[in-house]
């Protein structure tokens, strides 16, 4: 009896799905790069904080507005850093591999129910927070800005808000459909 050499064995057919599944590890360098970016933000935070302390120690002529702008910059850095943590931890857990932090005392509460949809909503709300800080800084400096800049920054912020609401609503519909 002749053996058919054109047919593939079941093991050969399973190799492609295994390779496709293993390709998720190509994202590992991306997440490691985001960890490096997190380090850059830590450096930026300390640089801004040192600048603020130096300003306060040098002169008594620092205005409340100057202090507020620097503090808003610090908050902005922290919020972007939080966004990075969500993307790094949530993205790794969702797309690469389980972190197995279930019994770790520092496990973020949101990580236990993270999926791509939840991650999108969390990212959208974090972006709105960051945009709000930028918009507040703009409004504080409004006398020195032209109306066109104020209008565009407000429209961009509102676009983020509407987009986040649309993402959240879509996620709500999808999660309700899954429950049925």
Image (cartoon, helix red, strand yellow):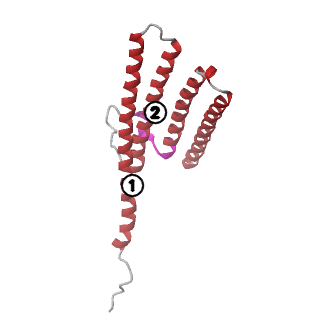
- Indicate yes or no whether the magenta region holds residue 151: no
| Residue shown at 40% from the left, 20% from the top | 51
Q: Which residue is mark 1?
A: 24
Seen from the viewer's position, the closer of residues 25 and 109 is 25
Q: Where's residue 86, x and y in %?
A: 43, 38
Which image quadrant for residue 15? Answer: bottom left
Which image quadrant for residue 142? Answer: top right
Farthest bottom residue in view: 1
Q: Which residue is mark 2?
A: 80
For the N terminus, the quadrant is bottom left
Seen from the viewer's position, the closer of residues 7 and 55 is 55
Q: Which segment is the magenta one?
A: 108-118
In the displayed structure image, the side of residue 92 where residue 121 appears, left or right: right
Seen from the viewer's position, the closer of residues 112 and 137 is 137
Q: Where's residue 14, x and y in %?
A: 37, 68
Which disc number belongs to residue 86?
none
Farthest top residue in view: 60
Q: Where's residue 18, x and y in %?
A: 36, 63
Is there a contact, CB below 8 Å, between mark 1 and mark 2? no
- Indicate yes or no whether the magenta region holds residue 112: yes
């Amino acid at each position: 009896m002749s053996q058919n050499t054109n047919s593939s064995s079941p093991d050969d057919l399973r190799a492609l799905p295994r390779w496709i599944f293993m390709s998720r590890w190509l994202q590992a360098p991306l997440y490691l790069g985001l960890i490096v970016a997190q380090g850059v933000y830590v450096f930026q935070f300390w640089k801004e904080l040192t600048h603020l302390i130096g300003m306060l120690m040098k002169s008594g002529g620092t205005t409340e507005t100057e202090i507020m702008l620097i503090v808003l910059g610090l908050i902005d850095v922290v919020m972007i850093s939080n966004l990075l943590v969500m993307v790094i931890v949530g993205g790794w857990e969702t797309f690469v591999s389980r972190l197995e932090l279930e019994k770790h005392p520092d496990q973020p509460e949101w990580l236990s129910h993270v999926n791509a949809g939840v991650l999108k909503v969390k990212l959208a709300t974090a972006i709105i927070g960051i945009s709000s800080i930028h918009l507040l800084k703009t409004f504080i400096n409004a006398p020195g800005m032209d109306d066109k800049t104020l209008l565009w920054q407000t429209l961009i912020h509102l676009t983020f808000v509407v987009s986040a609401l649309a993402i959240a609503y879509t996620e709500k519909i999808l999660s309700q459909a899954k429950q049925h």
